[in-house]
């Protein structure tokens, strides 16, 4: 595995933000190798009354939610064990300042489970979603998008690049 997550490993990468009470969802245009600082920088370019939410799914393995509001960035990763294989996941775990999990550790989310609580999905619901082993990460992100009220726009943004 290279030092960064290759763009070909991305299942999806979108930005979602509220403007005048309406959601706008757009594919994230990311160039080169994906790393956390590139992702956060790309998200800072978008407006949003409640910040901007970045939704990234990598290789049907894990997802990352990043919420940038002003100068603050909050993170949630769906599976901490992904950090042993994927540089983006490792960067999120490092940013969260939590110990690196072993490959044989249980797959659990880490970070801010309240990352979208004010937008319509509780920490408990988000945690339960992350625990659903029958769903692929992109399907989990679809559920988040649906709960927040922009499911159709999320699907359209994914189809636009896929």
Image (cartoon, rainbow, N blue to C red):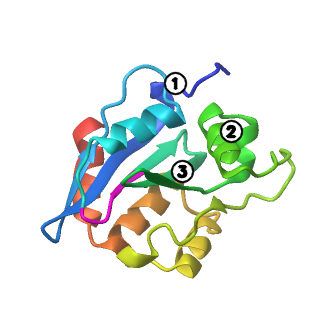
Residue beneath disc 1: 6
Quarter of image, res 92: top right
Residue beneath disc 3: 63
Residue beneath disc 2: 90
159 sits to left or right of 96 = left
Distance from the alpha carbon under mark 1 to that under mark 3: 15 Å
Q: Position of residue 88 (x, y in %)?
A: 59, 36
Quick check: 98 above or below 34? below
What element does badge 1 sit on? loop
78 sits to left or right of 58 = right
Quarter of image, res 108: bottom right
Quick check: 107 above or below 89? below
Q: Position of residue 65 (x, y in %)?
A: 49, 54
Q: Residue furthest left?
A: 20
What element does badge 2 sit on? helix
Circle 2 packing at 10 Å, graded few (<14), some (14-19), many (20+), is many
- Span highlighted in magenta in the image: 49-54
**In front of the other: 122 or 161:** 122
Distance from the alpha carbon under mark 2 to that under mark 1: 14 Å
Say whether disc 2 or disc 1 marks the residue closer to the N-terminus: 1
Quick check: 62 above or below 35? below
140 sits to left or right of 162 = right
Q: Residue furthest front?
A: 71
Distance from the alpha carbon under mark 3 to that under mark 2: 12 Å
**Disc 1 to disc 3: CB gap under 8 Å:** no
Label annotation for residue 34:
none
| Number of numbered callouts drawn | 3
- Can you tell which of label 2 and label 1 is closer to the viewer? 2
Q: Position of residue 121 (x, y in %)?
A: 44, 77
- Can you tell which of label 3 and label 2 is closer to the viewer? 2
């Amino acid at each position: 595995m290279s030092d960064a997550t290759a763009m070909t490993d991305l299942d999806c990468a979108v930005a979602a933000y509220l403007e005048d009470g309406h959601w706008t969802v757009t594919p994230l245009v990311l160039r080169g190798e994906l790393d956390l600082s590139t992702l956060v920088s790309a998200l800072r370019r978008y407006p949003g009354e409640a910040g901007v939410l970045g939704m990234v799914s990598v290789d049907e393995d894990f997802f990352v939610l990043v919420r940038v509001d002003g100068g603050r960035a909050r993170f949630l990763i769906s599976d901490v064990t992904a950090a042993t294989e994927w540089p983006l996941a490792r960067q999120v775990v490092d940013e969260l300042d939590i110990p690196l999990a072993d490959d044989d550790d249980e797959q659990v989310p880490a970070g801010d489970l309240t990352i979208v609580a004010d937008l319509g999905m509780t920490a408990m619901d988000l945690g339960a979603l992350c625990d659903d082993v029958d769903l692929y990460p992109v399907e989990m992100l679809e559920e988040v998008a649906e709960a927040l009220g922009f499911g159709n726009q999320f699907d359209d943004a994914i189809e636009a690049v896929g």
